[in-house]
Amino acid sequence: MLWIGTLLGLPGNWGLALLAVALAYLVNDSVHIDIHSPTVAAIVLLAIAGEVAEFVAGAAGVKQLGGSRRGGALAIVGSVVGAVAGVFIGVPVPIVGSLIAAVLFGGVGAFGGAVAGERWSGKDWDASIRIGWGALWGKLLGTLLKTICGTAMLALVLYAVWT
């Protein structure tokens, strides 16, 4: 569930990092879970890398095309609102419907937020829409990169639990 939370825009990677810490330091020694400090450190570093990658990709999508801070901030707000809306809109398709809709609507929300922010900053429609597309693709790329980091984290935790 934590890994899926990352797709929904929730802090799933940090949940995995906390799970790794709990498994390493709080589980009774009689339970055979072979997770050590280097593995926990790698998992925490992957969580940090996922956050940095998501932030940089999202910011680059707006900034590279000449977007303003306002456009970038509203793109973030729009992506969160879009992801939450997508969860509910995708409900008719079991399991994957909500996930796919959350990711896509997060991108659409970033697009809408960036366009609104750029229009509010006084840019014309063409420039605002171009920057909005940058926000959409930046959000999708950031989500992909963060999910890749989360997948690696999950693999490390599962390996430590099952070996």
Image (spheres, grey):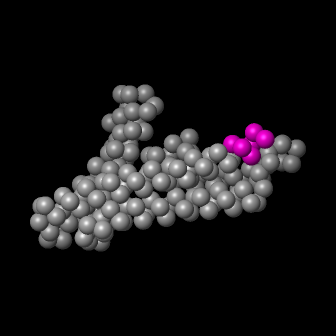
Horizontal placement of 56 versus 147: left or right?
left
Residue depicted at x 51% and y 42%: 4
Q: Is residue 161 left or right of residue 60?
A: right
The main secondary structure of the magenta stretch is: helix
Task: Determine if the magenta segment contains residue 159.
Answer: yes
Q: Could you say where residue 64 lies in the image, as x and y percent from the top left?
A: 30, 68
**Quadrant holding the C terminus:** top right
Q: Is 16 left, or right, of 36 in this rendering?
A: left
Instruction: Please determine whether, in this image, residue 46 is positioned above or below residue 151.
Output: below
Q: Is residue 35 above or below residue 49?
A: above
Q: Is residue 95 above or below residue 146?
A: above
Asked whether, in this view, residue 83 is left or right of residue 119, the answer is right
| Residue 155, quarter of picture | top right
**First to last magenta residue range:** 158-163
Q: Residue at x 42, y 39 (%)?
A: 99
**Quadrant showing the N terminus:** top right
Q: Judge whether residue 116 can be spotted in this image.
A: no
Q: Residue sitting at 12 percent across and 61 percent down?
A: 125
Residue 146 x, y percent position in the rendering: 49, 54
Across and down, in percent, residue 149 comes to 55, 53
Q: Is residue 93 visible?
A: yes
Outermost residue to the front: 64
Camera-side residue of 153 and 69: 153
Q: Residue at 36% x, 65% y: name it.
A: 59
Q: Residue 121: say if magenta.
A: no
